[in-house]
Amino acid sequence: MRSVVLLIRFDDVPESSWVSYPLPTQDPLTMAQRAFELMERRLENPGLASGLRTRHFRSSSSARASDLTLPRLFAGAILWQEGLTRDPGGRSTQMKGIRQLAEHLDISIGTVSRALNGKPDVNDETRRRVLAAAEELGYVANQSGRSLRQGTTNVIGLMLEVSRETVENSDDFFLGVTDGLQRVFSRHKLDLVMLPCPDDEDPHEYLKRMVARRLVDALIISATRRTDRRIELLEKARIPFVALGRSASGGSYTWMDLDFEGVATRGVDRLVAKGHRRIAVAVPSSDINLGYLFLDAYRQALQRHGIPFDPTLVIRVKSSEQGGYQAGHELLMIGERPTAIILIHELMAIGLYRRLAEAGVVPGRDLAVVGFREEPRTLFLQPTLTSFRMSLRDLGAQLGETLLATMPAYADHYPQGARNRIWPLELVPGESDAFMLTA
């Protein structure tokens, strides 16, 4: 069996190039695992390489190249026969460091370093020689060493909680938010990486591991719980952070949150004005704090209208299309059926409509429905869904600026400071609750 060499290109690490490693096997699964191990060992920081893109690697030593899709850990790797000396772009595959670059040019390491970093005490001719040689030889700056010396990574982490259900539903919320975040971070040459916590792991333990590894300079945490131990962890670690969501946990942390109370209040007011008094709500079955905020505001709105709170009208389901389907099923099983329902997650409406259609119940005619956030797929529902509108990009940008305001290195750029904020949502009337309920 011929030996092979693994060439890894760290596309998501600045100034990266092709790096070669000999491998003892040609088994695709073994080589994939080895690739991960080598990459983590080299960077001492796997978070830097989280590119959120899937590529392939292949073995050129086989008669027919076999492709294997890898998880989203690194941008790309190719296995080649040992002895190959140039990458597909025609450059040398051997990584050149600053020492090799200085030896090649026969000048001091200090001069090479100053030329590469644009220092004014290097003459133009020397600078041109150094830059040309760096390009020719495929010079790679030691980003890990630079980060270690500076005590920073120039990376911001966004912690998400993921499950098979959230992936399958393809919720676009964080895609829009990250767009806004990166627009802000790019002003300061900061990179954003996702820290996805699987649903079978304790978020506190996951975050503790990330903190110990010093993967990022600052953090944004989401899906805050009623009592969230992550807040105390980050405060004790003195890591700048912002919570996307409030919590009943103590501390003087900075947060941003959506106006869930406003959604509940305006939803109840709108439905009561149309004659409804038996108004159900679908809230998350988890301990996420937004459900408590929404439910408290719902109860207060009912009380203001003189409507007694009925716990049987509180339907606890998953925040997903499947959860919406289950909410519809449970609603139909209630003895004295409610005449209206308010949802607290955008995708619930899709599943709810499906279950109501199966039962011959028409939204906007037989049942009033108020959805949560206007989402691309809900725009195609018939009848059109009454929901709430917001700009995810603007939310992400504000979230990013709020985080940077907590970081001494960037606070001067954001004089408004790090302040807590509730993000408003605009009511968009539809046909799903358009009818007036007659006595």
Image: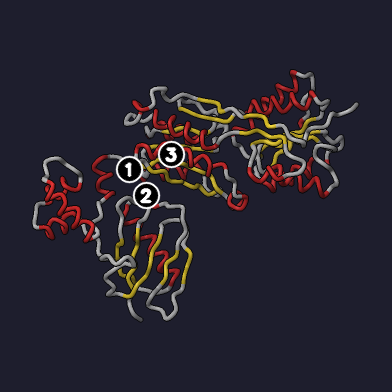
In what element is the residue under mark 1? Answer: loop
**Mark earlier in primary sequence (3, 2):** 2
Q: Amino acid at mark 1?
A: Thr
Query: Disc 2 designates what residue?
Result: 48
Badge 2 vs badge 1, beta-carbon distance below 8 Å: yes
Residue 313 visible:
no
Query: Disc 1 designates what residue?
Result: 153
Quadrant of the rendered image containing residue 237: top left
Quadrant of the rendered image containing residue 271: top right
Task: Give the residue at x 43% y 41%.
Answer: 182
Residue 277 percent coordinates (x, y): 82, 26
Residue 265 percent coordinates (x, y): 69, 24
Q: In which quadrant will I find the N terminus?
A: bottom left
Q: Give the distance between the C-alpha atoms of the residues marked 2 and 1, in whole angstroms.
A: 8 Å
Q: Amino acid at mark 3?
A: Arg
Q: Amino acid at mark 2?
A: Leu
**Mark earlier in primary sequence (2, 1):** 2
Frontmost residue, 146 versus 318? 146
Query: Disc 3 designates what residue?
Result: 183
